[in-house]
């Protein structure tokens, strides 16, 4: 059985939240090993070693050799729980691997050929990845590190589905028995078109915008710069009203 990583582990005998906190302060990580033909077993892993492995994609899709109390045990990583506020591993779930028993594991999907596909290169499309991981079933010896999908023949508005994933010999996808979801598609980019205003209304106090092709306004004409206000209808100017009881030259005197 091919193994990619070797992880040291020790049996854990004390349990409870207090014991787990003491382990983490000592640079250890509580974990559990289950599955196969054995009972679930509490184990302890080294935190510093885990930090060097958890960023590697292959760590989650490979059979690892768990050296439990100096005895190698093949296993796969089922879950890694991280601290919500800092870069620290809180707990790890491991599953035993039996050589002749099929296992189920999530594998990453790698995409190639997108840059040379007609949908991207000549038609200006954008690739949308809809699925990043797929659960497969296979024997440990047939386990690939990832699944690869070729996009080089995709055109604009094309979609590839789960059934289009090429599978190595001995590998199956259990989900295909009841569903065939889309995996990747190429769509046109979303373009926001700006609407041009044909005639803009000038704001209050702003200068009027001259219309192209209109005759120039003569100086002094109505509407021309510096022109006097237009006269009232009929050419008459409205006389200002005199105040009642007053006449030009002063107020009215009483006769004696």
Image (spheres, rainbow, N blue to C red):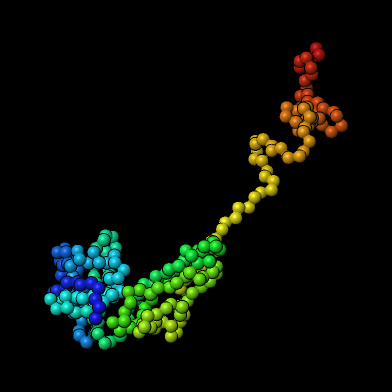
Q: Which quadrant does the N terminus fall into?
A: bottom left
Camera-side residue of 134 and 195 = 134
Q: Where residue 147 sits: x, y (%)?
A: 38, 75
Residue at the outermost right position? 234
Q: Where residue 210 sits: x, y (%)?
A: 71, 37
Q: Quadrant location of residue 3?
A: bottom left
Image side of residue 228 versus residue 169, left or right:
right
| Residue 118 vertical position relative to residue 248 in the rendered view, above or below | below
| Residue 212 vertical position relative to residue 18 in the rendered view, above or below | above
Camera-side residue of 184 and 12 = 184
Counting labels gives 0
- Report whether residue 133 is seen: no
| Residue 194 vertical position relative to residue 189 in the rendered view, above or below | above
Question: Residue sitting at 42 percent across and 78 percent down?
Answer: 166
Q: Where residue 38 sits: x, y (%)?
A: 20, 85
Q: Where residue 132 sits: x, y (%)?
A: 40, 71
Question: Residue sitting at 77 percent across and 33 percent down?
Answer: 216
Image side of residue 45 versus residue 150, left or right:
left
Question: Residue sitting at 16 percent across and 75 percent down?
Answer: 67
């Amino acid at each position: 059985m091919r193994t990619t990583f070797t992880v040291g582990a020790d049996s854990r005998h004390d349990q409870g939240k207090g014991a787990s906190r003491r382990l983490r302060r000592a640079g250890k990580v509580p974990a559990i090993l289950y599955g196969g033909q054995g009972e679930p077993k509490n184990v302890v892993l080294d935190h510093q070693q885990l930090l060097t492995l958890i960023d590697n994609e292959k760590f989650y899709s490979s059979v690892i050799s768990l050296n439990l109390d100096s005895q190698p045990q093949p296993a796969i990583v089922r879950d890694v729980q991280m601290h919500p506020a800092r870069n620290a591993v809180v707990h790890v779930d491991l599953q035993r691997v039996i050589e002749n028993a099929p296992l189920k594991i999530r594998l990453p999907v790698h995409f190639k050929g997108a840059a040379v596909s007609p949908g991207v290169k000549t038609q200006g499309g954008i690739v949308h990845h809809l699925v990043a991981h797929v659960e497969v079933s296979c024997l440990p010896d047939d386990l690939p590190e990832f699944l690869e999908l070729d996009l080089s023949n995709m055109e604009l508005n094309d979609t590839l589905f789960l059934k289009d994933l090429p599978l190595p010999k001995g590998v199956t996808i259990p989900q295909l028995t009841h569903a065939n979801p889309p995996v990747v598609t190429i769509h046109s980019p979303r373009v926001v078109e700006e609407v041009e205003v044909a005639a803009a209304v000038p704001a209050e106090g702003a200068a009027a915008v001259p219309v192209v092709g209109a005759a120039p306004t003569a100086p002094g004409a109505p509407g021309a710069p510096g022109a006097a206000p237009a006269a009232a209808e009929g050419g008459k100017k409205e006389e200002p009203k005199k105040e009642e009881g007053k006449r030009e030259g002063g107020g009215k005197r009483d006769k004696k």
